[in-house]
Image: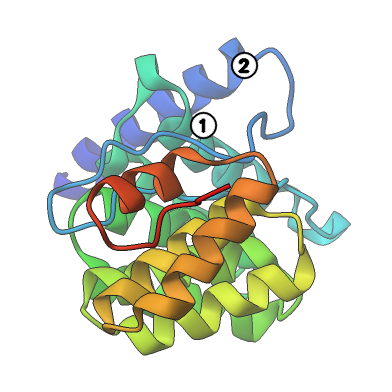
Amino acid sequence: MKKTFINYPVAAICLAVLLILPSPGMAERRSSPGAAAAAPSAPLRHTPEKAPKKSVSAEKWSQMAAELLRIKELRNPNLALECADKALSINPSYPPAYLNRGSAYMMLGQPEKALADFDQTVKLNPGLSQAYFNRALACEALGRYRDATDNYTVVIESNPDDAEAYVRRGAAFFDLLEDAQACKDLEKACQLGLCAPLEQARENQLCPKNNH
């Protein structure tokens, strides 16, 4: 009876989420997670759902988990966690489900569990840059700043125009007391159009001001 009581609302609510969505794909590359204090302020990234044909059901459960993290009006990390678990019970090798479950753990302030899921995502799909970005966030939350910079570097190598990744890597370099490298990253981000972090660093005398 207990199992029925728990799982029925999960299935019903997740199905309702899926039915009201305007399209089956995941909409935004970035979301606003509203994470717990222990988690970094940067948004987590999700990935478009491209499941193999044999895993259609796992794809739908994973998509529902992602939407419960992405859409402000529906945001429910606990329910997203259960949807991701359902996806993984159907297909334990489906990378987006691990990515979404890790994102839910981050919102719930559990970066250790999130990191394990992001590690599994990378293991299953080494080319998924979102997984490295989210893994870097989890490393930051755990105080593993060197690991964070390494993961942001992978993201930057995949997309050299990702200004947000430069900003996040710069913040991690500041935590490592490597201010020169941090400022270099913030300057690069500014060249790409994201200048507010560099301006703030200069106001706080963390980076030299531009004399030109």
Q: Is residue 194 left or right of residue 47?
A: left
Position in image of residue 10 (x %, y %): 35, 35
- Please give the name of the residue rendered at 36% of the width and 65% of the height, measured from the top-left corner: 171
Callout 1–callout 2 Cβ contact below 8 Å: yes
Amino acid found under the numbered disc labelled 2: Leu
The span from disc 1 to disc 2 (Cα, nearest Å) is 8 Å
Q: 168 and 147: which one is in front?
A: 168
* Residue beneath disc 1: 67
Q: Is residue 14 left or right of residue 204?
A: right
On screen, residue 115 versus residue 6, left or right, reads right
**Left or right position of 82 against 164:** left
- Within the image, what quadrant is residue 24 found in? top right
Q: Amino acid at mark 1?
A: Glu
Q: Residue at left 48%, top 35%?
A: 31
Q: Earlier in the sequence, mark 1 or mark 2?
A: 2
Q: Neighbour class for label 1 at 10 Å: few (<14), some, many (≥20)? A: many
Q: Please, what secondary structure does the residue beneath circle 2 have?
A: loop
101 to 1, vertically: above or below: below
- Residue 176 x %, y %: 28, 84
Residue most toward the right? Answer: 53
Which residue is rendered at x = 51% and y = 25% of the image? 15
Return the residue nearer the eye: 4 or 209: 209
Name the residue nearer the viewer: 180 or 150: 180
Viewer-nearest residue: 121 or 1: 121
Q: Residue at x 47, y 41 (%)?
A: 65
The answer to whether residue 88 is seen in the rendering is no
- What secondary structure is marked by label 1? helix
Give percent across and percent down for residue 191: 68, 49
Q: Position of residue 100 (x, y in %)?
A: 49, 53
Q: Is residue 72 visible?
A: yes
Q: Which residue is mark 2?
A: 21
